[in-house]
Image (cartoon, rainbow, N blue to C red):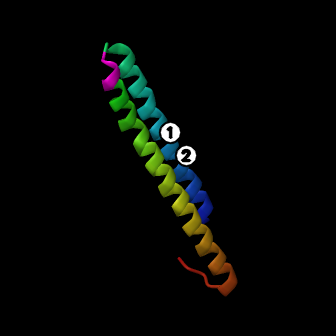
Amino acid sequence: MPTSTVFWIATALVVIGQLMILRSTIRAMRGASSQRARRGIEWSYAIVPVIALSFVLAATWRAAERHDARTQVTGEVTR
């Protein structure tokens, strides 16, 4: 299976997981009458992983592209 296919499958699964986390955060805040400061903390706990995973996925994509480019230039086949 090509590297890009595996990457996009993993990215789709990460996006689905993060959307479910955000959805559950919204539902939990809607049901509870929490203070405004607590809502900010809840959102930060939900948003910070989204941002961190975005950086990780971007770095992974760049590394995979470099690996694919190097493999095409040298003609090596790696498994």
Q: Quadrant of residue 67?
A: bottom right
Q: Amino acid at mark 2?
A: Ala
Could you classify mark 1 by the number of other residues whose Cα lies within 10 Å: few (under 14), some (14-19), or many (20 or more)? few
Does the rendering let one see residue 9? yes
Task: Classify mark 2: helix, strand or loop.
Answer: helix
Measure the C-alpha gap from mark 1 to mark 2: 6 Å
Q: Tell me what residue is drawn at x 59 percent, y 53 percent.
A: 8
Q: Quadrant of residue 28?
A: top left
Across and down, in percent, residue 69 comes to: 66, 75
Task: Classify the position of the N terminus by image quarter.
Answer: bottom right
Q: Which dot marks residue 7?
A: none
Task: Classify mark 1: helix, strand or loop.
Answer: helix
Taking the image as shown, residue 18 lies to the left or right of residue 73, namely left
Q: Which residue is mark 1?
A: 16
Q: Which dot marks residue 12?
A: 2
Does the rendering let one see residue 1? no
Q: Tell me what residue is drawn at x 63 percent, y 80 percent.
A: 71
Span highlighted in magenta in the image: 34-38
Do the numbered discs 1 and 2 sit on residues whose CB atoms are within 8 Å? Answer: yes
> Which residue appears farthest toward the right when viewing the image?
73
- Whether residue 63 appears in magenta in the rendering, the answer is no
Across and down, in percent, residue 9 comes to: 56, 51
